[in-house]
Amino acid sequence: MVSATSKRIYFTRHAQGEHNVAEDWMIPDAPLTQIGRSQSQRLHESTKETFQQTAHLLVTSGLSRTMSTTLVGYPDLKKRLEAEGKNVLVIPQLQECNGYPCDIGSDREILELNPEFAGLDLSQLTPGWNSKEGFYAWDSKSLKNRARWVRKWLRDREETEIVVVSHGDCLRYITEGQNSWTHWANAQVRLYTFVSDDDEQAELVKVRDVYPGEDFFIDEPEVSE
């Protein structure tokens, strides 16, 4: 089993969503804008010769904007992993934290009707994954518990190099254990590894910035990401 301290986890925030532009948190499962798709294409150009050639797993949140960012931003990695029998893995634990409509994912049956998402492994989006209740509740305690689950899940996997696509608030909880308001730009990528092999919180430590992404809001953090 590989040491957790040698793992490389590439965390990526989704590209620009419609809710980012309109500041309208009522847009259901807010999709990418055309600018967001262009940002994702630039993410691809910046990473296609580096970790897209080496990563062992590609995993994303089940919201439309993260899945689209994954498909447009990491097509070479997706193609290579699919050739090895590893489809993009979609897990509900990476969904955004808040209870606004823009942060509530669509039912699996709806997502399966979208041809863009054909071939993604949606099997873990079971009924209730988007309820924002129980394990997926959006109070601070529940969010910290969910973030710890993600860290432990990543640490316990056999893959050494993993690419994760998620959301600003969720990434803050995962990487820092709280919503610190540390800024994540659209399509930004940061590399992390684990502090130890067995600490209870599965704490992460930042290694370096990988790709700066592109800001939409410059002067203040977003309410919902």
Image (cartoon, helix red, strand yellow):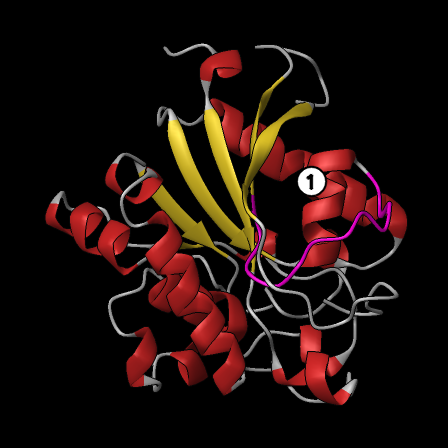
Question: Residue 223 location in percent, x, y?
Answer: 85, 69
Label 1, secondary structure: give it: helix
Magenta span main SS: loop
Residue 12, visible in the rendered structure = yes
Q: Where is residue 103 in the image (x, y as percent from the top left)?
A: 69, 73
Residue kind at label 1, given as amino acid type? Ile
Q: Residue at x 78, y 59 (%)?
A: 137
Task: Give the residue displayed 32% in from the left and 79% down from the top.
Answer: 116
Point 29% across, 50% down: residue: 48
Q: Read off the residue under disc 1.
A: 174
The location of residue 136, given as percent across then percent down, is 71, 57
Decide which of 39, 74 is in the foreground and name it: 39
Point 65% across, 14% down: residue: 195
Count of numbered circles on the image: 1
Task: State which quadrant residue 51 falls in.
Answer: top left
- Residue 186 magenta-drawn? yes
Q: Can residue 32 be seen in this view?
A: no
- Considering depth in this image, is 225 or 220 the residue closer to the camera? 220
Check if residue 94 falls in the magenta segment.
Answer: no
Q: In this view, does 174 lie to the left or right of 181?
A: left
Q: What is the quadrant of residue 100 in the picture? A: bottom right
Q: From the viewer's perspective, is 206 left or right of 81?
A: right
Q: In which quarter of the image is residue 17?
A: bottom right
Quarter of the image with the N terminus in it: top left
Q: Is 201 on the left-hand or right-hand side of 51?
A: right
Magenta segment: 178-189
Between 28 and 130, the one lying in front of the other is 28
Look at the picture and state if 65 lies above or below 54. Answer: below
Mark 1 burial class by Cα count in 10 Å: few <14, some 14-19, many 20+ = many
Q: Residue 81: x and y, percent?
A: 21, 46
The relative height of residue 50 versus residue 159 in the rendered view (above or below) is: below
